[in-house]
Image (cartoon, coloured by chain):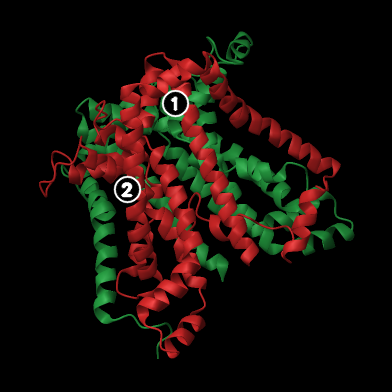
Chain colours: A red, B green
Amino acid sequence: MAGPGLAGVENATAPASPSGRRPRRVRRTTPRNTLTAGSGLGLGLAMVWFSILVLLPLAAVVATAGENGLSRYLDVLRNDQTWAAVTLTVGQSALVTLVNVLVGTIIAWVLVRDSFWGKGLLNVVIDIPFALPTIVAGLVLLSLYGPQSPIGVHAAFTRYAVFLALAFVTLPFIVRTVQPVLEELDTDVEEAAASLGAGRGVIFRRIILPALTPAITAGAALSFARAISEYGSLVLLSGNKPYSTEVVSVRVLTFIENGNNASAAALASVMLAVALLVIVLLDIVQRRVARRG
Amino acid sequence: MARTVTVSKPTTWLLRLIAVTYVFFLVAWPVGLLVRRTFSNGLTNLTDALSDEKVVGALQLTAVVAGWAVVINLVFGVTISILLVRFEFPGKRVLSALVDLPLSVSPVVVGLALVLAYNGRDGLVGPALEDGGLQIIFATPGMIMATCFVALPLVIREVVPTLTEIGDDQEQAARSLGASAPQTFWRITLPSIKWAVIYGVVLSLGRAVGEFGAVKVVSGNITNETQTATLLVEAKYQNFQQDQAYAIAFLLILVSVACLLVVAFLRPKNEK
């Protein structure tokens, strides 16, 4: 199943004309308008709701962040505790994404190319982190890695807890982006390479890996974006200790709870910028894949 | 014999072991443990929780908020999907990128954004709305909006690929035979995207029931008034009523796993 963000790699581009390069270029220079009266009204209403729900509130964040001028804005970001939260979040997210790239690709490989008893179950379990409410995800991890751990691991309230929570919630991203690509991959090329004497390592490096790279990149971007914005699963698990296990989202919430909306908005605007960056990156990757056909 | 290039036996086993162990320790075992703790005293945890007024209230509120959010996202999602796939208009590419934005925005930031726009004290338009008698923040409308925001792309991401795939031949045929636009929509378009819409709704429902961060910021977390099930899990756990926290969490797991299974079992049938 495709959870949020997973359908991405192959289908989200949805080119209006499947035929190739030229129509796209034409379309870009002269945007046509094929709206009828009815669909125009539909677009209008949809845009009004979209503006009320998304655009206006996000504009409010940017406006509030810029309210007190550039120097106050930078002060918020230069604050030691904020900086500690930023480095922790970015560091752990990068680490988790790296682990996901490795393990996620392995899991996708096992799900597609291997067959063993219980594979179907594995396939369903992969999606649990998406389906589970984040606060429940935290509670669930706490039961194995918390104070009452049956295996004596006390990771709760340490940096390892942050890593665990992020790894849990981002597990499906790379698996679910790589899996469909691996399924579609034509094995003829691999067989040809093997028959011409290429070793397994060479085949993997020169044939399989290049085909998977866009999917892995897209999955990694989604996983990183999700990790740096994670909140719910960390609330119970990480203890939210300033300078030690406090992530950016928690810091924003602390600002809000203290009534310091300007600082919250300043930090939030940085997170928004990163989210936008990821979306642009995904768009570029998808377009490149679509163009290659 | 080999459908694919053979991987040596030890490597196969190693990869299999890594995959299964990782998923077991990270997901399967912790979830299993939580379920076991819920039933450690038999059914008493569950019955205790369900006889607590607060818990029942929170579950009802979650149902109301999730229900509204899913209905709104359904209508909006189907509309936007059809517009994105079937029509050309200026700004289309920007719109299609923007509808994905909620997926990578932190729930806390979503909550903050809604508060900054709609709070009654110094919000962008909040004071004006409250003078008109509509309170959004710390009330149900705000919670519905927060839930809509985070679940926004789910219906669209399911419907857009299906709409693209089926093409518009049948719709054009219907139109050329004299069907009106609404007739074409109800008789041709909707039946052919039915399953995609259902998946989208199920995914949205799962997400809506489980939303925590955005709702926490927007709701003010007032016991018995704006406390949803997920917020109550946190409150109960921090009040050392862990048994009840486990029980509510178990109910939430049931809902999300049910959503998961519905999608997992419906999808292959549809694709064949």
Q: In the drawing, does residue A260 fall left or right of residue B235?
A: right
Is there any visible trace of residue B225 in the rendered image?
A: no
Report which quarter residue A99 is drawn in.
bottom left
Q: Which of the pair B93/A44 is nearer the observer?
A: B93
In the foreground, B115 or A167: A167
Residue B23: % across, % down? 29, 58
Q: Is residue A270 visible?
A: yes
Measure the alpha-carbon separation of dots 2 and 1.
22 Å
Residue in the picture at 17% in, 40% down: A146
The residue tagged 2 is A95
* Amino acid beneath label 1: Leu
Give the number of the disc on residue A267. 1
Mark 2 and mark 1 lie on one chain; the one further toward the N terminus is: 2
Chain for mark 2?
A: A
Q: Where, by quadrant of the figure, is residue B70 drawn?
A: top right
Q: Residue at x 45, y 63 (%)?
A: A178
Quadrant containing the C terminus of chain A in the rendered view: bottom right
Residue occupying image coordinates x 83% and y 46%: A33
**Residue A10, percent from left and from top:** 57, 61
Q: Residues within 10 Å of mark 2 (few under 14, many from 20)?
A: some
Res. A147 image quadrant: top left
Q: Amino acid at mark 2?
A: Leu
Along the viewing direction, whichever of B66 and B103 lies nearer the viewer: B103
Q: Secondary structure at mark 1?
A: helix
Chain letter for mark 1, please. A
- Residue at x-position 38% and y-position 42%: A227
User: How packed is label 1: few (under 14 Cα within 10 Å), some, or many (20 or more)?
Assistant: many
Q: Residue furthest front?
A: A71
